[in-house]
């Protein structure tokens, strides 16, 4: 819903939401909706999933316009909004506006540095930009020498590499990746680079889920070697493991370099302890109903 339609249907709601934050902020979306009229805090009776209340729609419009901005995230990882002038330092707010084309180019420059190599789709997806605008930015950065056209074996579309991209002899990484991590969010890139077919099964009926509700890929070295379904049980103070599966990537030339499953289990167990500590949980718990071909190896490591 755009500004005009919202104002026509709910006159004064944008000002109401802004004033609520001005008077009470910083606030989450739930906090804001608790301060508006009941009519504005009700979700539509039709639809599901991302169906927003009028107040939530107004909040997102104000966020897009730069009137409100997240001051932080709370323990539930919800955005906590405040007036933008109370969040951004004066020196930032005093800078002149940036032209859209220049802003798009800078965002693609950042995306290219983060990716190393990428297609139009890869680079556009990093900041959820339109592909036609991304192509224009790529052309400009190619002209200045910041992006270099390259070929990737098996890829049937143009690819660019950032001129400053490092090509290390070895990668010693270990991390559990959230489903929205840039490394895994663009699914085609993920499949082609790492051989992992990945989907978020939150909206899949429980009986039809393959790996679990909220599954995190596990990066070890330069491979995605496992996936694990986790839940933070705050009442028990526990990081709960509901499933753990070793990954067999569909990349014939890399399979021989994958670590064995016991090594994967050892490293995954260590990373689970790190995550539990980061969450403030005092234990890692593997449920009796936990499933997956790595579960028994993880039980032995507790």
Image: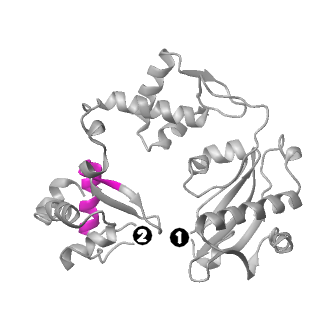
Q: How is the image coloured?
A: one colour
User: Where's residue 112, x and y in %?
Assistant: 54, 32
Within-10-Å neighbours for mark 2: few <14, some 14–19, many 20+: few
Q: Which residue is mark 2?
A: 49
Contact between marks 2 and 1 (CB within 8 A): the answer is: yes
Figure quadrant of residue 209: bottom right
Q: Which residue is mark 1?
A: 203
SS assignment at label 1 = loop
Q: Is residue 67 magenta?
A: yes
From the viewer's side, name the closer residue of 237 and 18: 237
Q: Which residues are magenta?
A: 54-70
- Is residue 120 in sight in this rendering? no
Work out whether mark 2 precedes mark 1 in sequence or the reverse, and give the earlier one.
2
User: Where's residue 137, x and y in %?
Assistant: 43, 27
- Work out how far the residue at label 2 is from the one at label 1, CA to CA, in angstroms: 9 Å
User: Could you tell me which residue is drawn at 61 percent across and 50 percent down?
Assistant: 184
């Amino acid at each position: 819903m755009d500004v005009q339609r919202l104002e026509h249907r709910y006159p004064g709601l944008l000002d109401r939401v802004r004033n609520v934050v001005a008077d009470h902020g910083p606030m989450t979306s739930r906090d804001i909706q608790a301060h508006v009229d009941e009519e504005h805090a009700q979700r539509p009776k039709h639809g599901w999933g991302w169906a927003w209340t009028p107040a939530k729609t107004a909040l997102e419009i104000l966020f897009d316009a730069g009137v409100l901005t997240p001051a932080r995230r709370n323990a539930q990882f919800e955005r906590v909004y405040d007036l933008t002038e109370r969040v951004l330092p004066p020196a930032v707010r005093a800078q002149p506006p940036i032209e859209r084309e220049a802003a798009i180019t800078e965002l693609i420059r950042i995306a290219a540095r983060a990716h190393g190599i990428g297609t139009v789709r890869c680079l556009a997806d990093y900041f959820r930009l339109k592909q036609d605008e991304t192509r224009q930015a790529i052309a400009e950065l190619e002209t200045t020498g910041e992006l270099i056209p390259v070929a990737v074996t098996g890829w049937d579309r143009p690819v660019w590499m950032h001129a400053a991209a490092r090509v290390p002899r070895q990668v010693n990484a270990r991390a559990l990746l959230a489903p929205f991590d840039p490394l895994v969010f663009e699914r085609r890139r993920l499949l082609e680079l790492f051989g992992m077919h990945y989907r978020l099964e939150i909206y899949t009926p429980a009986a039809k889920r393959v790996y679990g509700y909220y599954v995190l890929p596990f990066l070890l070295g330069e491979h995605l070697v496992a996936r694990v379904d986790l839940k933070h049980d705050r009442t028990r103070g526990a990081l709960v493991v509901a499933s753990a599966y070793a990954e067999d990537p569909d990349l014939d030339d890399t399979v021989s370099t994958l670590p064995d499953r016991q090594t994967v289990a050892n490293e995954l167990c260590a990373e689970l302890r790190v995550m539990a500590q980061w969450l403030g949980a005092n234990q890692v718990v593997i449920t009796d109903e936990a499933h997956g071909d790595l579960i028994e190896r993880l039980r032995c490591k507790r």
